[in-house]
Image (cartoon, coloured by chain):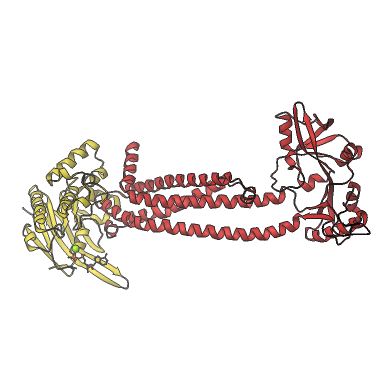
């Protein structure tokens, strides 16, 4: 893919955690660009700041300093609710630990982002069916997360992340809690999504998983190596 | 739209039965204990005041009785006889008395039209009104002219008035007491009276001038004397002086403890107020303890719930919930739980209060009064509930929805 258009741009992003007396710099000036339609993997040792970086890109967290442009717009100037609608429509986030609503069924979990997007009942039903079919779990729609395997839970989480058809998919160690077979299933799905034209940023520890991506960004001690 | 909102709300509550039941039971328990405590505290307080003042505040009752010591050649057991004139003369002879009335107390047939009852008739003087709080709702009490002219007039209790006259106005009508016509000059205002002596409660009595009583029925000696000392602190001394005075007149040993039986409500009150102060402290301590236990229970349940809830908020924010959506959802959930839990708690407390009212023991009723779900109880419990609801449900939700989604997700 050409890098004609930059979709994600970070400039000098710092994240400092105040821990009691002393400050911990999880990110110390990260700058990077990701083009529309790119498949990028982020690697680095534990504690190097990969999750911190992903949370900032996913608008789940705010940097201490630095600038973040999403589709050319400075995210720092946005209100809480504007960020909510970005998370709802522009970004899909897949977590290592799935973060599904434990009391809700697979169907209801996928429905949540659609409800916040004000979709009517008929269109929700249609979309959920489509998504569950795409991840191969339509027959599991009435199951709760506790009744699903890790791989199945992650596929539900992936379906939820795709609910409002976001252009960007962010995944923080999506296969970290899965066996290699389930991991390959997820990677197959991500690969398909990339081919459809989505931008994918994925954190991983595993070189074989990273091999699915076009480019790898390496983090070390809160900086791009 | 609203229907969908409520359906989702109900579904959310039902979907998390453990959380809902835990929170609900906390609220039910909290409401139940608070309502019951406030209702009981209030009614005990009220019954305490009522029993003090229903019979009359700060009064001494003297019942001429029989001698228990031999005196001047008479064996013990001689009846002690005091005339109403001697009783009224006390005002002159013994200092420190504010006011008094002699009383004749007999049961008489009272009749109006077809209604006839055997009720207590009291022969008294005009001072009786102030001593015993027999305030007229209509008309007037017995006056000095009635006394002087031995008029056939009567003042009647409110219950007797309804028994005889129904909804008609009794004032100016004639009732027959033992066949002789009396004009009704006044009807007593309803009053609470839990203690009594000699005959029926005031609400059932007819009051006539003692002069008329003596003339018509040939009564010579009083059933009792009722008096109020000027200084309530000196009631014991005044009583002693009265006994000394009567010992000469009626011929009994001034040291005879029972020749005149004394009921000093002032002494009674002193003892009771100490008792009630202790009781109030006790009740307050129990109330504080119950609230504490209930509060800790609700709080610890909420701790568990809030942690789980915070994660839920984090997830919802992460997939694009607006802050207001979250707040509306959690506020209505909390409100729903508070309303349902509050209603159940109220119902349980009301049931227990009904049970208490149904306890047939008179002593129990006198002590606890009539616990009711009064406006005070409802309002204060409502406020406490609202406070608990705000603190335990809304504030954590607001806090969770005010941070970065990732903060909420870390929980
Ligand atoms: N909420 C927090 N408070 C304080 N320090 C934090 C917090 N979150 C992360 N850190 C610290 O910031 C640094 C980077 O953490 P981060 O989770 O981004 O690392 P990571 O690269 O994702 O590690 P891993 O591979 O183990 O997931 C670590 O030293 C971590 O301890
Ligand atoms: Mg991480």
Residue B231: quarter of image? bottom right
Front residue of A12 and B168:
B168
Q: Which residue appears farthest toward the bottom when viewing the image?
A: A21
Position of residue B287 measured from the top left corner of the image (x, y, whole percent)? 53, 57
| Residue drawn 48% across the image and 59% down it | B292
Front residue of B219 and A15:
B219
- Left or right: B365, with B401 as reference point: right
- Left or right: B42, with A203 as reference point: right
| Residue drawn 17% across the image and 48% down it | A159
The chain whose colour is red is B
Visible residue check, residue A71: no
- Left or right: B396, with B254 as reference point: left
Specify the quadrant that holds the N terminus of chain B: top left
- Left or right: B313, with B277 as reference point: left
Visible residue check, residue A159: yes
Position of residue B340 measured from the top left corner of the image (x, y, whole percent)? 42, 44
Front residue of B77 and B22:
B77
């Amino acid at each position: 893919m050409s890098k004609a258009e930059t979709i994600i741009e970070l400039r000098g992003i710092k994240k400092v955690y105040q821990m009691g007396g002393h400050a911990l710099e999880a990110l110390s000036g990260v700058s990077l660009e990701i083009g529309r339609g790119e498949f990028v993997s982020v690697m680095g040792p534990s504690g190097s700041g990969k999750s911190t970086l992903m949370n900032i890109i996913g608008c789940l967290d705010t940097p201490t300093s630095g600038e973040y442009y999403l589709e050319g717009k400075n995210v720092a100037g946005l209100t809480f609710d504007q960020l909510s609608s970005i998370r709802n429509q522009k970004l899909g986030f897949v977590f290592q630990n799935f973060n599904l609503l434990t009391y809700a069924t697979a169907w209801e979990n996928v429905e949540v982002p659609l409800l916040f997007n004000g979709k009517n009942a008929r269109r929700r039903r249609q979309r959920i069916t489509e998504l569950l079919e795409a991840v191969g779990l339509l027959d599991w729609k009435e199951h709760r997360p506790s009744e699903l395997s890790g791989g199945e839970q992650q596929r539900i989480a992936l379906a939820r992340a795709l609910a409002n058809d976001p252009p960007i998919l962010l995944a923080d160690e999506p296969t970290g809690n899965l066996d290699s077979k389930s991991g390959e299933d997820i990677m197959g799905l991500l690969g398909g999504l990339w081919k459809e034209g989505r931008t994918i940023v994925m954190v991983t520890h595993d070189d074989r998983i990273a091999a699915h991506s076009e480019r790898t960004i390496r983090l070390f001690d809160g900086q791009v190596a | 739209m609203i229907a969908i909102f409520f359906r989702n709300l109900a579904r959310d509550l039902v979907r998390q039965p453990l959380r809902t039941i835990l929170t609900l039971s906390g609220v039910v328990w909290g409401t139940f204990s608070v309502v019951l405590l406030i209702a009981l505290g209030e009614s005990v307080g009220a019954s305490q005041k009522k029993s003090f003042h229903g019979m009359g505040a700060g009064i001494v009752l003297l019942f001429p009785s029989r001698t228990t010591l031999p005196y001047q050649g008479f064996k013990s057991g001689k009846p002690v006889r005091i005339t109403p004139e001697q009783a009224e003369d006390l005002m002159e002879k013994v200092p420190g008395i504010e006011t008094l009335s002699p009383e004749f107390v007999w049961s008489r047939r009272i009749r109006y039209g077809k209604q006839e009852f055997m009720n207590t008739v009291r022969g008294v003087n005009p001072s009786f009104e102030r001593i015993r709080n027999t305030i007229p709702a209509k008309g007037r009490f017995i006056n000095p002219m009635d006394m002087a002219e031995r008029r056939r007039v009567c003042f009647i209790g409110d219950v007797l008035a309804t028994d005889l006259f129904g909804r008609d106005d009794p004032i100016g009508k004639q009732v027959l007491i033992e066949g002789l016509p009396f004009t009704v000059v006044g009807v007593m205002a309803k009053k609470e009276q839990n203690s009594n002596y000699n005959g029926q409660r005031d609400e059932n009595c007819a009051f006539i001038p003692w002069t008329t009583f003596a003339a018509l029925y040939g009564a010579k000696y009083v059933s009792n004397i009722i008096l109020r000392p000027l200084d309530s602190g000196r009631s014991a001394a005044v009583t002693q002086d009265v006994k000394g005075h009567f010992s000469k007149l009626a011929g009994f040993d001034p040291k005879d403890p029972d020749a005149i039986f004394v009921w000093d409500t002032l002494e009674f009150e002193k003892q009771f107020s100490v008792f009630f102060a202790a009781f109030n402290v006790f009740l307050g301590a129990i109330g504080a303890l119950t609230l504490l236990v209930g509060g800790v229970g609700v709080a610890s349940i909420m701790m568990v719930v809030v942690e789980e809830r915070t994660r839920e908020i984090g997830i919802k924010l992460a997939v694009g919930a607006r802050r207001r959506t979250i707040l509306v959802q959690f506020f209505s959930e909390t409100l729903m739980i508070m309303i349902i839990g509050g209603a159940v708690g109220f119902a349980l407390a009301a049931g227990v209060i009904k049970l208490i009212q149904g306890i047939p023991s008179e002593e129990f009723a006198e002590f606890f009064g009539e616990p009711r779900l009064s406006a005070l109880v409802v309002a204060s419990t409502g406020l406490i509930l609202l406070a608990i609801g705000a603190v335990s449900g809304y504030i954590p939700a607001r806090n969770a929805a005010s941070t970065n989604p990732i903060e909420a997700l870390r929980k």
